[in-house]
Amino acid sequence: MTKAKLTCPKCGKDEYVEMPTTYCQIFYKCGFCSKMIETEDGFCCVFCSYSDVRCPYSQKHDEQIRTFRMDIINVGKV
Ligand SMILES: [Zn+2]
Ligand SMILES: [Zn+2]
């Protein structure tokens, strides 16, 4: 399991939260102030918005994009 240090934008406290690997978590209820943390525009989840790491889901997505680009480059050479 991957844990992320999620910094609450409401109270500024850090909390270690386990990240889901199969989906993007777009809401998180802060364990300190009990306020709902919402994902910022342009990010896939609360971890990508407010934590020190990117979620496993978006890392996987990046890999797929990279593989796809490599394919285009290879096709261009032929
Ligand atoms: Zn908070
Ligand atoms: Zn994410």
Image: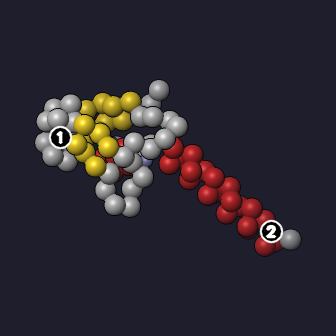
Residue 38 in sight: yes
65 on left or right of 33? right
- At a point 50% along the width and 36% down the height, the residue shown is 21
As measured in the structure, the alpha-carbon distance from the residue carrying label 2 to the one carrying label 1 is: 50 Å
- The three-letter amino acid code for the residue at tag 1 is Lys
Asked if disc 1 is less than 8 Å from ligand 1, the answer is yes
Q: Residue at x 19, y 47 (%)?
A: 9
SS at mark 1?
A: loop
Which label was assigned to residue 35? 1
Tell me the quarter of the image containing the C terminus: bottom right
Q: Is residue 74 above or below residue 59?
A: below
* Ligand 2 closer than 8 Å to label 2 CB: no
Q: Residue furthest top?
A: 1
For badge 2, the amino acid type reads Val
Q: Which numbered disc, 2 or 1, marks the residue that appears first in the sequence?
A: 1
Residue 25 at x, y = what percent? 39, 42
CB within 8 Å, label 2 to label 1:
no
Q: Is residue 7 left or right of residue 33?
A: right
In the image, residue 70 lies at what x, y percent?
71, 61
